[in-house]
Each structure stands twice: as C-alpha cells, then as structure tokens.
C-alpha cells in the first residue's frame, strides 16, 4: 500500500511537471511563430522603404535639364514609340550623376521619361504659337486637357518649344525636326523645377520611414533570436514518466 501511494504521488508530480513543460513548449512555439511573422512583415516594409528611397533619388538625378535636352534632341516626330529612348547609358552618366545606380535601375526610368517627353512634344508642337511673347507653363496648360504625367518633363518640353517659337518669331531660323534649337541649359532652375524644398521634404520622410523600418526589423530579429533560445531550453521529457515510475516500482 505504501509503495502504491508513493508511486501515485511521484506519478502525479511527474505528470504535473510534464503538463507544465508541454504548455511552456506550446507557448514558446506560438511566440516564435508570431515573431517570425512580424519579422517577415518588417523585412518587407524595409525593402519597400529602400525601393521608394532609391526611386526618389533616381528620379531626382534624372530630373535634370541636360537629360531632358538630350531626349528632346533625339526626338523624331516620325516615330511615336519612345524615339531614341535608349539614349546611351554612357552619355547619361556623363550628363548627370548616376553613381550608385545600376544600368538595370536607370534604363526603365529613362524609358519612362522618354515616353513622357515624346507625348509632351507631340502635343505641344501643335499648340505653342510662333510669337515673341509666350505664356508661362501654368497659364498655358490651364484650360487645356493635356495628358500630363510627369510635370517636370512637360515643363521642359514646353520651355524648349516656346523658346524655339519665340526665336522663330524673331527670324532665327535654325531648326531641328520642325522647331528651332534653343537650350534648356542655363535656364533658372526654378523655371524648370521649383520643387527643391518639396523634394528635400519628401526625401527626409522616405529616409525616416526607411530608418524606422530597419529599426523595427532589427528589434524583431533580436526578439526572435531570444525566443528561439528560450524555446530550446524547454525539454519535454518524452518517456520520462514511464521510465521513472518503472524504476520506482522496481525499487520497491
């Protein structure tokens, strides 16, 4: 009787211990799974933020009057699908600072700008009058239903054509593909962009988003490592209860 009581007591303690460990194991598994999901999301957010910042910086690098002029001078009105959109990367890299950007990152962006420039030139060449007094871009586009996607590209195209038509009105007859050849280079930056402060603010916000995303990714990564270590310390005593009970009974 005494032996049976001892076996019952010890067995009960072992079962309680096993249940506790099993519960702890399940809790640890849930914690690890939760942190793995959070880490996946945090990593995704960091990647999105990095991509957005890179796109912003690339757009800024390509938003340059010399780049626009290179595209304009390659324009051919007889072609409508991205004429000369493949402006040689070596030329682009000479025109503007593209250090830090791979050709594979720049090419899609320049093709998109070239397509927008083609659309702008094909629309504006028939709308801008040949006269010495030309409207400012904002006044010109008001009331006209123009398919403007990239404001800076359209502004550059308009400034180019309006200068050409102004020169033509003054009897300057050097032409290229139907309009004269003024230069955008040297034009006041505010005339082409006027977006410096907005760009700086946008970049600051993107950088802050990237920093927060990376910080979250790092913090969750550390928490996950700790959770994995904690889980590893929990040893479920598989077969331990029956083994110990057998030894106790045998000893009795």
Image: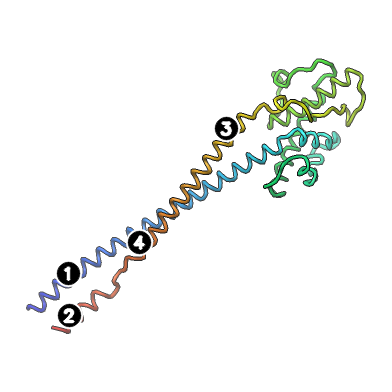
Residue at the spot of label 2:
248
Q: Secondary structure at mark 3?
A: helix
x 10%, y 79%: residue = 3
| Circle nearer the viewer, 2 or 3 | 3
**1 or 4: tag closer to the N-terminus:** 1
Q: CA distance from mark 3 to mark 1?
A: 67 Å
Instruction: Residue lying at the far left in this picture: please name it.
Output: 1
* Label 2 crowd (10 A; few <14 / some 14-19 / many >=20): some
The quarter of the picture where the N terminus appears is bottom left
**2 or 3: tag closer to the N-terminus:** 3
* Label 1 crowd (10 A; few <14 / some 14-19 / many >=20): few
Q: CA distance from mark 4 to mark 2?
A: 32 Å
By what rule are the colours in the image chosen?
rainbow
Which mark, by number, is residue 12? 1
**4 or 3: tag closer to the N-terminus:** 3
Which mark, by number, is residue 201? 3
């Amino acid at each position: 009787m005494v032996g049976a009581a001892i076996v019952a007591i010890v067995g009960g303690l072992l079962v309680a211990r096993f249940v506790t460990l099993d519960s702890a194991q399940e809790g640890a598994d849930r914690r690890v799974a939760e942190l793995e999901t959070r880490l996946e999301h945090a990593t995704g957010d960091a990647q999105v933020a990095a991509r957005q910042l890179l796109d912003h910086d690339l757009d800024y690098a390509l938003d340059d009057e010399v780049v626009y002029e290179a595209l304009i001078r390659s324009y051919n009105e007889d072609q409508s699908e991205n004429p000369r959109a493949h402006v040689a990367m070596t030329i682009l890299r000479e025109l503007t600072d593209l250090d830090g950007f791979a050709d594979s990152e720049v090419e899609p962006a320049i093709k998109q700008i070239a397509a927008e420039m083609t659309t702008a030139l094909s629309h504006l060449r028939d709308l801008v009058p040949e006269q010495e007094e030309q409207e400012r871009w904002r006044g010109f586009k008001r009331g006209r239903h123009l398919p403007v996607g990239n404001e800076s590209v359209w502004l550059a195209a308009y400034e180019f054509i309006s200068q050409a038509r102004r020169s033509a009105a003054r009897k300057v007859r050097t032409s290229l593909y139907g309009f004269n050849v003024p230069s955008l280079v040297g034009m006041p930056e505010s005339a082409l962009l006027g977006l410096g402060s907005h760009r700086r603010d946008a970049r600051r916000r993107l950088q802050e988003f990237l920093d927060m995303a990376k910080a979250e990714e790092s913090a969750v990564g550390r928490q996950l490592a700790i959770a994995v270590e904690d889980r590893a310390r929990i040893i479920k005593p598989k077969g331990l209860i029956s083994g110990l009970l057998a030894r106790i009974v045998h000893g009795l």
